Amino acid sequence: MYTDILWDFDGTLFDTYPGFVDALLQALSDEGIQAGYAEAMSLLRVSVADALDHYARNYRLGKAFTERFHRYHQAMDRSQVRSFPYAADVIRAIHKSGKRNYLYTHRGYSAMEYLEEHDLIDYFQDCITREDDFPPKPSPEAILYLIDKHKIIKSQALMVGDRKIDILAAENAGIKSCYFHPGAPEECKSADYNIRSLTEVAPIIS
């Protein structure tokens, strides 16, 4: 049984990738580069840093490209961002059962703003965002910090994320992992669980 559930944000609780792709393609277009949507999406699913580095390296783009991407992304219409189906129901059910939710994301404080706007922030025991300045995943440091702070029993902790760096971070911290891949056919063989819908979390943690 799992009592402490650690959640990634982008691509796991909220479907934010289209906004990332749009910002990336717009920043590239400003440089005269026409990149494919599928390619950009695939790179971003590894990590934002990997995607930016890929294009900067291959097209010899400077700091202005990265800054432009972040500016476009910050200016995106937040009202277009939706939580994944059943995300709110699962989060609330975990909290109601006496178990605990935690957020661990590379996104900044805007992740918590999204949770507040969707009336979910009160269902989280703790949140780690970019502002907390932990080394990025797959480093286990942020997870280990939560484990120590909240006296979490490792065997009862589960990390849910949509990227392999989430799975690696969980593995490096010595906890179980669940790979969420709603729009992609491939599974993550190193994950302890693979799911296509967040409704599948309930039987795993019960």
Image (cartoon, helix red, strand yellow):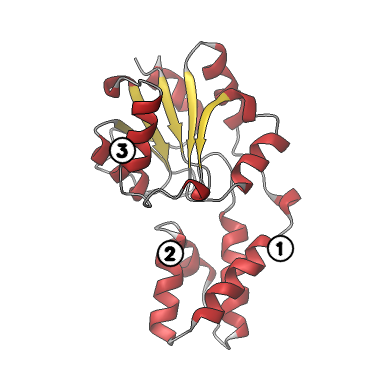
- Which residue is identified by label 3? 170
Which tag, 1 or 2, sits closer to the chain's start? 2
Give the residue type that dot 1 points to.
Ala
Q: Quadrant of the N terminus?
A: top left
Q: Is residue 168 above or below residue 19?
A: above
Observer-nearest of 166 and 134: 134
- Which residue is identified by label 2? 49
Q: Looking at the image, can residue 178 be seen? A: no
What residue do we see at 49% from left, 48% from top? 183
Question: Residue 56: which numbered mark, if any?
Answer: none
**Residue neighbourhood size for the residue with mark 3, other residues' Cα within 10 Å, grouped as few (<14), some (14–19), many (≥20):** many
Residue 93 in percent (x, y) is at 56, 17
What number of labels is visible?
Answer: 3
Kindly check if marks 1 and 2 are in contact, taking CB atoms under 8 A apart as contact. Answer: no
- Which residue is identified by label 1? 75
Residue 139 in percent (x, y) is at 31, 48
Residue 54 in percent (x, y) is at 40, 74
